[in-house]
Amino acid sequence: MNPVLTEIPARILHLAFGALSQANMHAVFSDPGNEHWDFISVTNTAHAGELFLKAIIAKEHPLLIFKDLFSLDDNRTDSIELVNLVKRGKTHEFERLPQVLWAVTGKRIPNPECYERLRRARNSIQHFCAPEDEDFRGLSLEFIYTIIDPLIFEHFESFAIEYHEDHSVGYDYVVATLLRKQLRFSIPDDFDITEIRIRDEISDAGQSYCDWLTRELKRIGRLDLLSK
């Protein structure tokens, strides 16, 4: 394979984790003066999802992310250069990526219904007509933790909770929000929290969610976190 092409998956993945860090931050935190973060969480979440899907596809072959391979050839050079790929190449649109992923890997994305809701919300925001009664933060978190999180765990052995911009505390408040919303998430073996009490955050959670969390904490040997 052309050495230039081998750089593409890592480049995409680096940008994807950056977008995920912002998406997590904007979906979880809300303070006076940053009310616009609910809208931004949707655009960043969509951006992260798009990049992660392209990174997965590019792992199979980097050229598969481009929808018109013939446009990459300018008939003037004998080799592919990254700058020409960026300049001339047109990648698949966000709405088509689930189909491309299936065609390339044979796997469907998790929660396609949520994917479509976020796609529509992103389009509405971009066209200045976002509905005022939409829970954009909730939608973003649902997308991150039912679509992005399982995908990056499977393909890159990564955990979505670890990507955020709260560098002083860590993922504690991200986890607290997920627990309150009863969203399941991939839990690393070194999982630990110090700023929240899990039993308080899941006080209103259903039994099935509590059972899932108990199993996961038992798996990593941290049942003690339930009693702190």
Image (cartoon, helix red, strand yellow):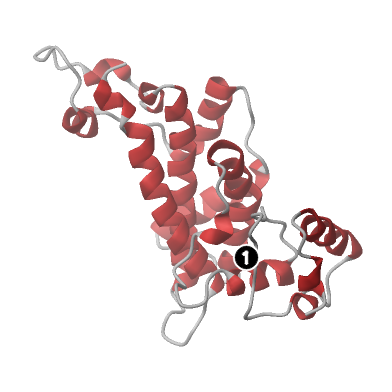
Can the viewer see residue 129 in this picture? no
Question: Residue 189 or 136: which is nearer the viewer?
Answer: 189
Please state, as top left, top right, bottom left or bottom right, where the C terminus lies in the image: bottom right
Question: Residue at position x 8%, y 14% from top?
Answer: 76
Q: Is residue 59 above or below residue 176?
A: above
* Residue 85 vertical position relative to residue 36 in the rendered view, above or below: above
Say which residue appears at 66% left-offset and 52% top-offset.
186
Q: Is residue 223 visible?
A: yes
* Residue 196 x %, y %: 67, 80
Is 10 positioned to the left or the right of 147 in the image? Answer: left
Q: Residue at x 60, y 60 (%)?
A: 141
- Taking the view exactly as shown, the residue that stands out farthest to the front is 221
Please state which amino acid type lies under the numbered disc 1. Answer: Gly
Tag count in the figure? 1
* 7 vs 104, nearest the viewer: 7
Percent x, y of residue 171: 56, 69
Q: Mark 1 packing: few (<14 Cα in 10 Å), some, or many (20+)?
A: some
Residue shown at the point (44%, 36%) measured from the top left: 55
Seen from the viewer's position, the closer of residues 215 and 16 is 215
- The quarter in which the N terminus is drawn is top left
The residue at which mark 1 appears reads as 138
In front here: 7 or 207? 7
Residue 212, percent from left and from top? 83, 57
